Image (spheres, rainbow, N blue to C red):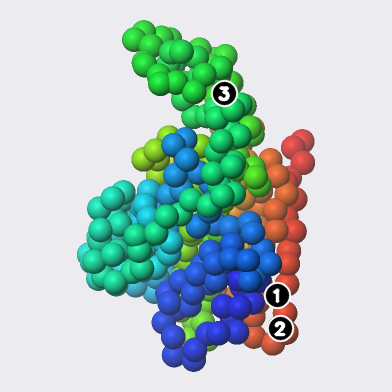
Amino acid sequence: MSVQLSYTTFKPHQLICDRVSWKFIFANEFYEPQYGFTYAVGYGGSPDEDGETTLDAMIMDGTTMDVGAVGAIRNVKDAIRAARLVLQYTDHTLLVGDQATVFALSLGLGGPSNLTTDQSLAKWLKWKESDCQPNFWRNVMPSSNTSCGPYSSIESFSASNDDFDRRKDLCSKRVGFGNHDTISMAAIDKEGRIAAGTSTNGASYKIPGRVGDGPIVGAGAYADQEVGACGATGDGDVMMRFLPCYQVVENMRLGMSPVEAAENAISRIKRKYPAFIGAIVALNMKGEHGGACHGWTFQYSVQTTGMEDVNIFTVYPAISS
């Protein structure tokens, strides 16, 4: 619905980055009861291990290659607007934490706002009652497998193959529809300008201060007017190590179709992390699109000129040979 609403409200001379920003604003407001939809990215989304909802967002102009991003921003509902302010009013790429909040509020963005809801609080309390499982700690005592902490470091430890396998397996336990909130989008206007962006709460029960792949250029999203754009979702701590969206755009530059480019980028990650969960959507300048995923089935939406309604596409994980 966010794609449909934002598409129908575009103004003829609206900047492409503003168009993408408005898509996110519609999507992030879907928590509100008047929309009859309570699954949200943003307000009331995934709490961290202290029960607080914090946000990451990024927007990239594929014509100028300008980027604005915020990470671990607190008490601001419209993270994508904050990212847009970084792009428009600074020479920086990424602002984080409380200072990002101060910056956004100083330029007139609404807030400070409490992003916690009854729903997100109940989710956090249930997690606490389950001994804080799963979580993102390791090499600490008491054991993070049975305790909520507080933790202290184990002064000496040796990494083993078993430990590596355990961490790879955790990917599938920590990331899924119910504990991971991300929206990625890309748009091309009639003048051929392209932009992409991402807005996310990140993983549920993340360690406070964590920044995911969403605001990292080339990880959560990427756009280049010469080629196309990409958006990603999944286990951000794994995916940002591979810059999958940058890889997708460069793959398309080399002649791959959007589907081929996305599948290649996913394959590079799953060779190292067979249990990771993630998905990628790719769009080239011809308007051709496609996606790839691993560990789950996902859907993405498309609307173009001449379409009366949004088309929804389902992408299935490749079957390993």
Lower position in the chain sequence, tag 2 or tag 3: 3
How many other residues sit within 10 Å of disc 2, few (<14), some (14-19) or many (≥20)? few
Above-or-below relation of 261 to 7: above
Closer to the N terminus: mark 1 or mark 3?
3
What element does badge 2 sit on? loop
Q: Quadrant of the N terminus?
A: bottom right
As displayed, is residue 47 above or below residue 106?
Answer: above
Label 3 crowd (10 A; few <14 / some 14-19 / many >=20): some
Q: Amino acid at mark 2?
A: Met
Task: Give the spatial CA distance, label 2 vs label 3.
Answer: 49 Å
Q: Position of residue 220 (x, y in %)?
A: 48, 53
Q: Position of residue 290 (x, y in %)?
A: 66, 62
Residue most toward the front? 118
Compute the Cα span from label 1 to label 2.
7 Å
Residue depicted at x 64% and y 77%: 4
Q: Which residue is mark 3?
A: 131
- C-beta proximity under 8 Å, tags 1 and 2: yes
Q: Please name the amino acid that badge 1 sits on.
A: Val
> Mark 3 belongs to which amino acid?
Asp
Left/right placement of residue 121 relative to residue 65 reads right
Residue 72 in the image, given as x and y percentages of width and height: 38, 48
Q: Is residue 156 left or right of residue 233?
A: left
Q: Is residue 58 visible?
A: no
Residue corresponding to mark 2: 307
Residue 270 is marked as: none
Residue 310 — which label? 1
Assign a secondary structure to mark 3: loop
User: Residue at horizontal 53%, vertical 52%?
Assistant: 117
Which residue appears at 70% of the width and 53% of the height? 298
Residue 209 percent coordinates (x, y)? 36, 40
